[in-house]
Image: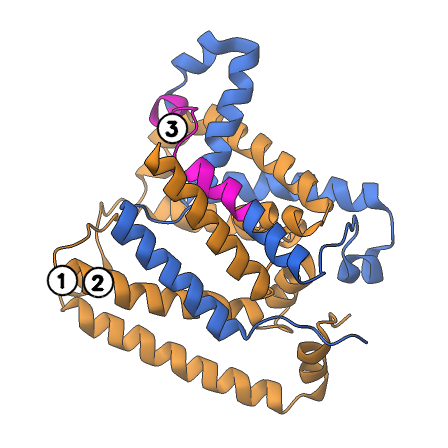
Chain colours: A orange, B blue
């Protein structure tokens, strides 16, 4: 029961920040895919860098366990391509579809229904996928530091540095384009 | 045009990152959403044929039940609603602005593409184990 309560409270906080960060709407997601609105890129990478540092700090202190998923290239590459195709059509990922509905975006309800059907179709296809696509390029549960044979803080430092470099370049890029700045100020999508 | 009162995305993203860390620390749970769609579909399918669902390999792996993540996803809905409502930004809208501008105002047209896109996106996400 406590576990369910933790889940709910975590979700409320996360959903709150997603809405405040303006990463939920179809216009924001398509804006990211069309490379005209980088809000989601900024939000997502900020999350990743903070969480990466925090979780590995706790890991080094022996306070948490990592949850590493197996790296299966067949699944990741083909699944990623299929996901991208769907994302461009639907304009929501699973989490943001639920949150967008909370903001009152009714098309997100259709997205959620579709995602439920997609999950059902995947469950039907799983026995076949398991013996085919999901056997292609299976490297098991491996992390980037393990694969590279370096200390995890080297990878964390590199990812953090590259992220900051990207942020700096994004701000410069947006600063040089008045249309993007206007969009940032008013929240209006570029058509 | 009204000023958008959203937060700085770097700050909001970093704060959501802290939520991530706290969740792993306090509850031992990494944030995720898509498995909940599998469990929910399993629960719906159980209404029509519990025996068939019980035999399906994927539903044996991801048991259809309410768990930490299901409540996390429900919480996301509530959190986004509260954030929007308290800022006066909650607004019922069936066709997003960018879509309307490009493809027109038909809610059915938009709904159909969202539905099909949702099917494709979730299938791909699950295949990539995300």
Magenta segment boundaries in residue numbering = B58-77
Q: Callout 2: residue from which chain?
A: A
Report helix, strand or loop for mark 2.
Answer: helix
Report helix, strand or loop for mark 1.
Answer: helix
Query: Marks 1 and 2: in contact by CB < 8 Å?
Result: yes
Q: CA distance from mark 2 to mark 3?
A: 27 Å
Would residue A147 be visible to someone looking at this image?
A: no
- Residue occupying image coordinates x 46% and y 65%: A44
Q: Is residue A18 left or right of residue A189?
A: left
Image x and y of residue A110, in percent: 69, 39
Image x and y of residue A128, in percent: 41, 26
Q: CA distance from mark 1 to mark 3?
A: 30 Å
Residue designated by label 1:
A60
The N terminus of chain B, quarter of image: bottom right
Residue designated by label 3:
B62
Would residue B51 be visible to someone looking at this image?
A: yes
Please tell me whether residue B71 belongs to the stretch shown in magenta.
yes
Residue designated by label 2:
A56
Query: Which residue is at the front of the view, B113 or A82?
Result: B113
Pointer 1: residues within 10 angstroms few (<14), some, or many (20+)? few
Q: Tell us which disc is closer to us: 1 or 3.
A: 1
Image x and y of residue B58, in percent: 39, 25
Report helix, strand or loop for mark 3.
Answer: loop
- Residue occupying image coordinates x 60% and y 58%: B83
Query: Which residue is at the front of the view, A151 or A107?
Result: A107
């Amino acid at each position: 029961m406590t576990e369910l309560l933790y889940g709910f409270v975590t979700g409320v906080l996360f959903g709150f920040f997603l809405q405040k960060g303006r990463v939920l709407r179809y216009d924001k997601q398509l804006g990211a895919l069309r490379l005209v609105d980088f809000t989601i890129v900024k939000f997502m990478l900020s999350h990743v860098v903070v969480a990466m540092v925090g979780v590995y700090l706790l890991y080094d202190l022996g306070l948490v366990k990592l949850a590493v998923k197996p790296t299966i290239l067949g699944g990741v590459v083909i699944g990623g391509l299929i996901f991208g195709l769907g994302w461009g059509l639907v304009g929501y990922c699973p989490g943001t579809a639920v949150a967008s509905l909370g903001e009152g975006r009714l098309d997100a309800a259709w997205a959620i229904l579709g995602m439920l059907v997609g999950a059902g179709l995947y469950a039907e296809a799983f026995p076949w996928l398991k013996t085919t696509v999901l056997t292609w390029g299976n490297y098991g549960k491996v992390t980037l530091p393990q694969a590279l044979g370096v200390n995890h803080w080297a990878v964390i430092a590199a990812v953090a540095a590259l992220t900051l470099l990207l942020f700096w370049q994004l701000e410069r890029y947006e600063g040089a384009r008045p249309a993007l700045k206007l969009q940032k100020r008013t929240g209006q999508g570029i058509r | 045009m009204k000023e958008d009162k959203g937060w700085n995305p770097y700050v909001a993203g970093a704060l959501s990152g802290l939520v991530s860390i706290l969740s792993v620390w306090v509850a031992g749970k990494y944030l995720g959403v898509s498995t909940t769609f599998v469990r929910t579909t399993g629960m719906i399918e159980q209404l029509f044929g519990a025996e068939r669902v019980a035999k399906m390999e994927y539903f044996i792996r991801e048991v259809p039940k309410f768990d930490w993540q299901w409540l996390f996803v429900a919480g996301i809905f509530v959190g986004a609603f509260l954030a929007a409502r308290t800022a006066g930004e909650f607004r019922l809208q069936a066709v997003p602005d960018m879509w309307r501008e490009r493809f027109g105002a038909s809610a059915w047209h938009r709904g159909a593409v969202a539905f099909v896109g949702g099917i494709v996106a979730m299938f791909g996400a699950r295949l990539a184990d995300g």
